[in-house]
Amino acid sequence: MSLSKLRAGIAKRTGGDAGNFGALDVEVREEFSSVVLEGRVPDWRLKVELGWFAAGFGYKGVVNDLEVEGIEEERLAPSFPAGDRPLEGRSFDVAIIGGGVVGCAIARELAKWKVSAVLLEKEEDVAAHTSSRNDGMIHDGFAARPGTRKAAYNVRGNRLWEPLAGELRIDFSRPGSLVVFGSSAAKAAYPIMAARAKENGVDGWEFWSRKRLLAEEPNVTDGQHGAFFLPSAGIVSPYRATVALAESAAANGVEFSLGTCALGLEKEGGRITRVLTNRGDFRAAVVVNAAGNWSDAVAGMAGDRFFSLHQRRGVEMILDANAGRHLNHIMAMPSLLTVNRKTKGGGLVKTVEGNVLVGPTAAEAPGRENYATTAAELRELEKHLRLNKKLSPSMVITYFAGVRACTYEEDFIVERSERVPNLVHAAGIQSPGLASAPAVAEDVVRLALEALAATKRVSRNAAFVAARRAAPELRRLPFAERAALIAKNPAYGRIVCRCEEVSEGEIRDALRSPLPAASLDAVKRRARPGMGRCHGGFCTPRVMEIVADELGIPLDEVTKKGPGSRIACGQTKAGAEGGRQ
Amino acid sequence: MIPRERRDVVVLGGGPAGLAAALAASESGSDVLVVEREERLGGILKQCVHDGFGLVRFGEQLAGPEYARRYIDLVEGRRVAVSLETFVHSVRREAPAAARRAAAADGDPGFFVLTCVNRDRGVFELEARALVLATGCRERTDRQVFIHGDRPAGVLTAGLAQHLVNIEGLLPGRRAVILGSGDIGLIMARRLTLEGMEVEGVYELKSEPSGLSRNLRQCLEDFGIPLHLSTTVVEVHGKRRVEAVTVAAVDQRGQVLPGTERRVACDTLVLSVGLIPENEIAESLGLSLDPATKGPRVDQAGESQAEGVFVCGNALHVNDLADYVSESGEAAGRAAAAFAARNGAPAARGRLVPVKAGPGFLYAVPQFVDRGRPGKAVLYFRSNATLREGARFAARAIGPDGAPAATLLEKRYAALRPPEMERVEIDVALVPVDAAAVSLELERKEGLRG
Amino acid sequence: MAETRKFVCIACPRGCPLEVDAEPDGKGGFAALAVRGNACRRGEDYGRAEIVDPRRSLTSTLRTEGAAERRLPVRTTGGVPLGRLVEAARALDGLVARPPLKCGDVIVNNLLGLGVDLVATDDLSAAAAADQGRKPAWNN
């Protein structure tokens, strides 16, 4: 019944009517408990809109296989060739596919149990994709649509982050978020906002008068009518959080196999038995799908593709650290909140490092790993600067793009597969994925242990150490402590990155962490050299030198992000052969 | 308790400006210490292996390291103290200590205290009567000129490319596109070519080249490397390593002309898109910056509006020649030594007469003339446009009534180009004691008739 | 037949625009007749030379062994014929500089028989003995 309604609606949207099923060649059918869209549409935007539309008919998921002229279907493939097969023939209780914040949080949660676990990440480091390409907000949970899994996980995750950050020894701040009333109409919407916050179970909200707003945020632009304040909104560094989760998991026995891409899942009797990768095939009793923008592809490998993803880009700008003193809270504009139900609209975020982050944008665009930015996207972001009198486009030091992994239902999928009993999905984790990750991890591990119970009795890992052994950050230590550390280890006294005040010793620590960095980007994620205003112009050769020394490789083999991304292509004065190939 | 070392003058930076300042201060009798962040003295000159340095100072064409070596040898010869691989964490002013306050003169501005970090001494403090900022400049990055597209390896600034090639002996790639026709970009076009790389072309957003004419000749024309004016790089392609860039023509305002985009295969993008004085420490000391130079405002000895803080070289404004960098370092070093020698006694500083650069100037340095410093004052300026037909320059003292009170200098130029800095001298004695300003005028030759 | 060539003087940073009247010398080359636009004697010399026998000094680096630095900067003591500049640059590929060297030390006499020497443009000192403290242990 609903299928015929859905067909009629799609026909209308593709230029046809109920009798003549669309001017376009679109097929709709049910499969398992999902609805499948097939055929061809002229543009990607229409494909996404039809997917959204189909999501409103009560199916478990929308599998949107519509082809779009000129846009190739993307295939999950290794990012670079593997040189070895260390996983070949091995056996694990749990294999986690994906080293983003969700996969790493699951790995650490799993480390609390006596299981053998491996995490597969196709890049040379964890947090290489969406987890290093977001604003770091630990959202309050107000913006998510009431009743969604997103809303529930967000509020739960928000509560978990502060103690977790303490265990991980990473910065966590809770500046709170201000939804500024730009008009008296926006101000009048306060009761609606409060009702929503209440419904979502958000931890506190306040009405701020214009006077209070000006007192707390003196640089807010003139003409604001007050604000809706959500004190529970917090901030972490998303990539440092992900790396810290991974380090803690690794230190507690989870194996991390980097540069490892899942190529297939072999099944016997409806259960996954083997995981096929470019670094060897191995047995796994339970598989966790935390593959981010590829989670639908991984589900497909197990024959359980009941949903599909579309990509929503988010572009953000980072302002110079000097800008941080002009901002006290996270800030957003209310008009944007209501305009687009798919996103929270972006704003200004003061990062834990004191920079100001502006954004993100939210626009559907194809490309699971398309991080190219455009000038138009930056222009769009400049509007957020108008929230604060002291901020200007000249403060921009860099900008980047991320891609949200969105289902057409626009909600998270956290469940044990209905078709494959030893597969657990943590899929479609878009915003607020970072905020939700600790809560998602708890549930995924519970589901994984249930799945594992069929073959194994699992007990708690009594040896689990919650506190991460964190390397010192000298710039944050009192002078006496700093001096003592330098006396013990002079490399802490040699500042390599002057903009961010990072010493040689800290870079060496990053290269020796429980999940060691092996590229410049990975070092940057752990110790920050090159993150400052000169963007590595000064420190890059020095960091390369330390990386080469620690890894025991020639200087010209140092990479930006793993094989295929060398900084240099050879040596000068290498004679007739013209440098190493 | 943090250990503290006392000096008369501390110089921040051991490049050409800092070395000249340290030498001059030492020769003036000061006890000087140079703080250098790198493992060797010489600053950026260490990697400038090309020649052309020293024509003004030494009448010779020296390579960069050779030019630096002359100063290093002199500095070492005078046993000037040097603290290498040392990071300046912060700088603050401190009132004279109680023990010394009794002896201190009224109005004693006190001392500068620098908190420093290095391997051997850990955390320590340097105390100085006078501070010379010779911290050089840094390069603008691809983000600051808003290049879009992917973020692969193979995008680097010209200075980083120069360091990799000349110091580390690394070849950045096989085929390079250079964005920006600044001097380092031009020098690197030649350097990469001589090391066996192919330089596909140099692209310049502006309608005129940014570098010196002679570098266009000897770095591009000699090797047949094309220069594409009014053209820029709009996008980088390549997931892991640069595979190509998109270049496009731009209009007079730098806006891309649609339809002119062209894909250029390359594995390296080198950026030479401008230099910015390093002014973090200056800003932390509350010095006001000149928006035109992006360096602090100073008088003819490099003294900023904060007493006892002297600024020189590229930290002050980006110079075209190392010779002028050394010259400004010397002036600052001498003046810093004199300041320190007063040991807190009331400053002999005279009235600061603002230097006002009129229309036609990109900027002029210094921004003030101190009437209390007798002798010659060296002024540097750049025109804001190319004046091929020539121009007439004049420096006039403006009286309290706003009318010209004295002509300090008049000079004709056959041609002026923004990349080429000009240097003039005026006699401070000619500036009336009550002068309201020193006004700089630039008149195009076309306007000179009659 | 005489022709006028225009180019920028590279003798100093001033970069005077030169005009040089050139005439075939009957031996396959050119002779310079008059130089205009120069502000000094060096410009005139350069202008003539550029017609008769254009030369450029070569600046580059050498590989090092046993030294504190990976490369030693070098230059030629005079001009190398422009047409042989790349060849001269390639000739440095096989050379190795060993410390100690002082700035100005001659590394190669009469490079490629071109009548110019190759000299060091910086000092080169020996590598320090095993540099203590460069390899800290993970220590907390």
Image (cartoon, rainbow, N blue to C red):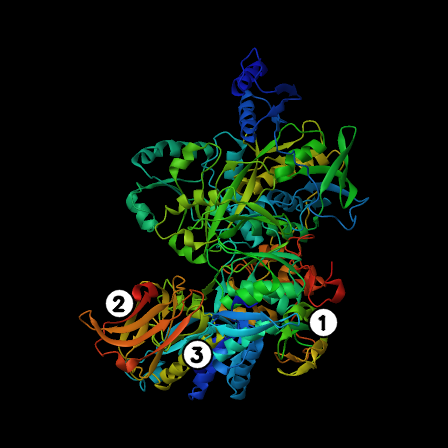
What is the distance, in whole Å, between disc 1 and disc 2 at their CAs?
60 Å
User: Decide: marks 1, 2 in contact (CB < 8 A)?
Assistant: no
Residue C138 in view here? no
Nearer the observer, B179 or B275: B179
Please state the total of marks drawn on the protein image: 3
Nearer the observer, A91 or C99: C99
The x and y percentages for residue B268 are: 62, 56
Disc 2 versus disc 3: nearer the observer: 2
Instruction: State whether residue A547 is above or below residue B347.
Output: above
Instruction: State whether residue A58 is above or below residue C13.
Output: above
Sequence-wise, the earlier of marks 2 and 3 is: 3
Q: Identify the secondary structure beneath mark 2.
A: loop
Q: Name the residue under label 3.
A: B327
User: Decide: marks 3, 1 in contact (CB < 8 A)?
Assistant: no
Residue lying at the far left in this picture: please name it: B401
Instruction: State whether residue A13 is above or below residue A455.
Output: above
Instruction: State whether residue A252 is above or below residue A367.
Output: below
Q: Name the residue under label 2.
A: B450
Q: Are marks 3 and 1 on the same chain?
A: no
What is the distance, in whole Å, between disc 3 and disc 1 at their CAs?
37 Å
Q: Determine the chain carrying the residue at label 3.
A: B
| Mark identifier at residue C91 | 1
Tag 1: amino acid: Ala
Are there few (<14), some (14-19), or many (20+) residues within 10 Å of tag 2? few
